[in-house]
Structure formats: C-alpha cells, structure tokens
C-alpha cells in the first residue's frame, strides 16, 4: 500500500478491546464495512490483563482455600504450596484459548483487522503506519491504563495489576493501595495464596461505590480472613530498599512489605492520539458523549473505559453493539448506566445492580429496604458462607436496587438485573418459584419477605 493510499469504510474503530471489538463484530453482522485498529492484542485489557486473568487467579485462590479448609467438611486435605509457575500456566492457557477464539471470530466476520498504533488525523481518518483509514463513522475505543499517585513510580516492588498478574512467587507481605474493585480482588487472591495482606484506602470504606451495607460486611469478612483493612488513611510515600518496600501513611505509621500493589483507579487512554486536534472535547482526559454515545463531533463515537462511568467489560460490549446498531440506523434503546450489573469477585463475592439505598433516597425520597440473611439459606449453609441479599424498593413501587454478598453470589446477578431493569415489584418476584436448595432462593426469599409473606425469615 502506498503512503497516501486511502481505505474507505463505513466504520473505523480505534482500539480492539471489549468496546472496540464488540462494535466491529456487530457492525460486520449488520453488513457494514469495518476496519479495527489494534496496537497490542485483540481483546484488550479485559482478556489479557483484566477480567479473565484475574478471575483465573481468583479461581486458583478458591482451590487453595478449599484444600486448606477441607477439614471443616470432614475431608482430610492440606495445602502443600502454591506454585506460581503452575498457576500462571493455567491462567495463560485460559487467556490463550479465548484469544484464539476471538481472533477466529474477527477473521470469520471479514473485519479488516489492522495491527499497529493508530492516530486520528481529522475527525474521519485514522492513520496507522503508512495507511490512512477513512470512515464515514469513527469509533474511539482506546481504553484505560492503571494510574499511580504523584511521586509513586511503578517499578521493582511497586506494581500495578498488570505486573502483579505474572508474579513468579507468592510474596510474603503485600500492601494493597486502594480498596476499590481491583484492590479487594487482589487482596483476596494474595491472602488465599498465603500472603499477609494490608489494604490502605483513603476513603472511609472499601468498595466505596457500593451500598454501605456491602462495604461493612466485606470489611468484617476480610478481617475474619486476617486481611488488615485501614480505611480513611492516606498514603504519604513509599521507599524501596534491596528486599523491602516501606509504605508511609499520613498517620505517621509505616508498613514494610515485599510488594506494594497500586490499585488507585484507571485513567483514559486519550493523550497524543489526535482527539483534541480533531475537535473532540475531552473532560479530564475522558471523552464525554450523549446517551447515544456520540461525541461532540459529527460521525465520531466513543465506547468503553474512555467514556465517563462504570469501567466494566460488559458495559463496553453493550456500548460497542449499541454504536454499531446506531450507525446502521436501527435506533437502539439507550443503555441505562444504573441497570448495568456489577460483580466484585473477591471472597466473599459482591454483586449489585441498580441504586444503592442512599442513591434511591435521593432519587425516590421514600424507600423500603429488606435484608435477607444467608444464614437462612440452605445452600449458603452447605457452602459455609455468610452474607445477605439487600433489596431497595421505591415506596410501594418497583425494586430499584439489589445488593448481595456471600460466596458465589455473583452468579445471582442475572436474575437481579432482570428484576431491576424490568422494574419488577416484590409481589411479581414472590410469585416465581426458586429451586431448592440454591443460593438463588435467597433472592426469592427476600422478595417474599418484602411482599409481606416471609418463609425462612422472621416477619
Ligand atoms: C485487573 C482488572 C480486572 C478487571 N476485571 C473486570 C471484571 O471482572 N469484569 C469487568 O466487567 N471488567 C473488568 N475490568 C475492566 C475491563 O477490563 C475494562 O472495562 C474493559 O477492558 C474496557 O474495554 P475498552 O474496550 O474500553 O478498553 P480496553 O480493553 O483497554 O481496550 C482498548 C484497546 O485499545 C488499544 N489501543 C489503545 N490505543 C491505541 C492506539 N493508539 N492504536 C491502536 N490501538 C490502541 C489497546 O491496546 C487496547 O487493546 C478489569 C480491569 C482490570 C485492569
């Protein structure tokens, strides 16, 4: 291809992560011509350094816990050791198989997959090496990166989630800076693998975006697991010597560790990509859009982590599909951000959808809540887990929030999201039969109770 050769497409997508590749696949299904530009690996953060590898580590962590705790169930097992070479081989195997499958899907869809770093040159052209890809529509999907704090350099014993995913040994002592989703998931893994773990969080509670009741229960469960939780404490600095990193807090306390995991949030990848030069408005680096995911520039859309809001892979998928359908003229219904389910896969798991109690009070004024304790649920007792299902309902109205915590509760989010998004009333759900003994019954029981007819719960 010559230096000034132009390729014309209906859609040119910059970034092949969850948002970008979903948009490419759906666009191709709808008969649009598509170019998908990716500088690293198809699948992006989620597949290679996010959702999938972390969940593989969390599964290995669960296996370690099961081996350690067999005695509790009358089964004589002991945990010998955790071999990170083996754990990484298992994790990389999962990622590798999914990557291959995804590459096959993109190839079969006749998407023009362009490897290389792309940059906007005007609103409708993406330049990659000597190729100029011109799109009637351009979709920005360049994702996010792990942030650090001022003066805190990543390197050596100071890592982000990306480096922490391929450790060749289990560190004896870990400090996790940040008690959000990524921080608590890694804290959970390290603890199960045998590390001493301390979480330092500046906000007053862990998983601060969740309903307060979930934060309290998680902190209780983590303390029981002997994970030290320091909330409302600000990080002051970190110094590294040969074999130790010393973390100082503004309270004057210092903590020595073998590894400092920095999990203080993720920033948008939008710098130096020609966005602003093309006239695209940025807000603190993010790309604001309207509810149809249009930027301020005609024919330029944005999806995924660069759009302000929840940074979740399934939000990226949904937005990518939405934009493809929008471009194809199908007029899809806008995505309601609060209806997107959220799962944090630490032990115990957290799963929620809809409004927290505080948000519901702000939006609806009068609300009713109900907490069904997993102590009354047969399957939860069999698993030996503690937690609850909390429902938030607009007074005499639909369920507007479901908040759950306990082992495997992430699996319950499917029904919970239908309840919230279909605006079900407790009476609607109370009429549905939930299989026994499942943890899913806890969701049914909570609705029975809120409908005024509790079964395995006190009135
Ligand atoms: C440790 C961790 C765990 C997570 N766990 C979960 C989870 O369990 N569930 C969940 O829903 N979400 C999870 N997430 C979040 C999820 O990974 C992101 O929300 C999702 O990947 C965002 O998709 P995206 O398409 O916006 O961006 P990305 O997946 O980041 O993709 C952007 C792509 O664009 C490419 N790119 C960037 N700039 C250029 C350029 N100039 N030219 C060409 N290509 C470029 C990048 O290489 C990348 O492949 C996790 C994230 C992390 C870090």
Image (cartoon, rainbow, N blue to C red):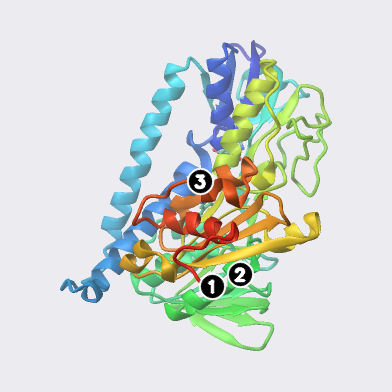
Quarter of the rendering containing residue 172: bottom left
Q: Nearer the viewer, residue 429 or 389?
A: 429
Seen from this angle, which residue lies furthest bottom? 252
Check the picture and name the quadrant holding the N terminus.
Answer: top right
Residue 6 in the image: state x and y as whole percent.
Answer: 66, 11
Residue ID at (34%, 57%): 437
Residue 74 in the image: state x and y as whole percent.
Answer: 18, 74
Count of numbered marks = 3
**Mark identifier at residue 213:** 2
Q: Which residue is mark 3?
A: 415
Question: Which secondary structure lies at badge 3?
Answer: helix
Check the picture and name the quadrant holding the C terminus.
Answer: bottom right
Seen from this angle, which residue lies furthest front? 453
Residue 217 in the image: state x and y as whole percent.
Answer: 54, 72
**Does residue 447 appear in this view?**
yes
Q: Nearer the viewer, residue 429 or 192?
A: 429
Question: Between marks 1 and 3, how big is the CA–CA gap?
Answer: 22 Å
Q: Which residue is mark 1?
A: 217
Asked if 205 appears above or below 34 in the picture, the reply is below
Mark 1 or mark 3: whose residue is earlier in sequence: 1
């Amino acid at each position: 291809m010559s230096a000034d050769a132009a390729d014309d497409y209906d859609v040119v997508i910059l970034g092949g992560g969850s948002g970008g590749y979903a948009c490419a696949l759906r666009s191709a299904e709808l008969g649009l011509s598509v170019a998908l530009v990716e500088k690293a690996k198809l699948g992006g953060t989620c597949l290679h350094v996010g959702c999938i590898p972390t969940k593989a580590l969390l599964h290995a962590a669960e296996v370690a816990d099961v081996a350690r705790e067999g005695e509790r169930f009358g089964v004589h097992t002991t945990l010998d050791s955790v071999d990170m070479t083996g754990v990484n081989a298992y994790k990389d195997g999962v990622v590798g198989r999914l990557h291959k499958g995804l590459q096959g899907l993109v190839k079969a869809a006749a998407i023009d997959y362009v490897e290389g770093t792309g940059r906007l040159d005007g609103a409708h052209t993406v330049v990659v090496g000597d190729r100029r890809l011109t799109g009637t529509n351009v979709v920005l999907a360049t994702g996010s990166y792990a942030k650090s704090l001022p003066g805190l350099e990543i390197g050596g014993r100071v890592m982000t989630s990306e480096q922490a995913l391929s450790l060749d040994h289990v560190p004896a002592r870990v400090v996790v800076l940040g008690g959000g989703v990524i921080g608590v998931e890694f804290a959970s893994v390290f603890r199960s693998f045998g590390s001493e773990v301390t979480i330092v969080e500046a906000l007053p509670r862990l998983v601060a975006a969740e309903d307060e009741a979930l934060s309290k229960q998680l902190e209780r469960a983590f303390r029981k697991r002997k994970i030290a939780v320091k909330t409302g404490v600000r990080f002051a600095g970190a110094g590294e010597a040969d074999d130790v990193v010393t973390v100082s807090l503004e309270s004057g306390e210092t903590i020595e560790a073998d590894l400092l995991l920095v999990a203080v949030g993720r920033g948008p990848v939008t710098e130096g990509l020609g966005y602003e030069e093309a006239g695209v408005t940025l807000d603190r680096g993010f790309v604001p859009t309207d509810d149809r995911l249009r930027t301020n520039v005609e024919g330029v859309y944005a999806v995924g982590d660069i759009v302000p809001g929840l940074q979740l892979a399934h939000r990226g998928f949904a937005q990518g599909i939405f934009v493809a359908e929008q471009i194809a003229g199908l007029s899809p219904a806008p995505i309601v951000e609060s209806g997107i389910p959220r799962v944090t896969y630490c032990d115990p798991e957290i799963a929620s959808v809809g409004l927290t109690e505080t948000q519901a009070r702000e939006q609806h004024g009068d609300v009713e809540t109900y907490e069904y304790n997993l102590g009354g649920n047969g399957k939860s007792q069999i698993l030996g887990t503690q937690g609850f299902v909390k429902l938030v309902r607009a007074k005499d109205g639909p369920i507007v929030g479901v908040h759950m915590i306990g082992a495997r509760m992430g699996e319950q989010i499917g029904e919970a999201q239908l309840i919230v998004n279909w605006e079900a009333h407790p009476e609607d759900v109370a009429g549905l039969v939930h299989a026994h003994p499942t943890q899913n019954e806890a969701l049914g029981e909570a609705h029975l109770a809120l409908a005024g007819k509790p079964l395995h719960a006190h009135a």
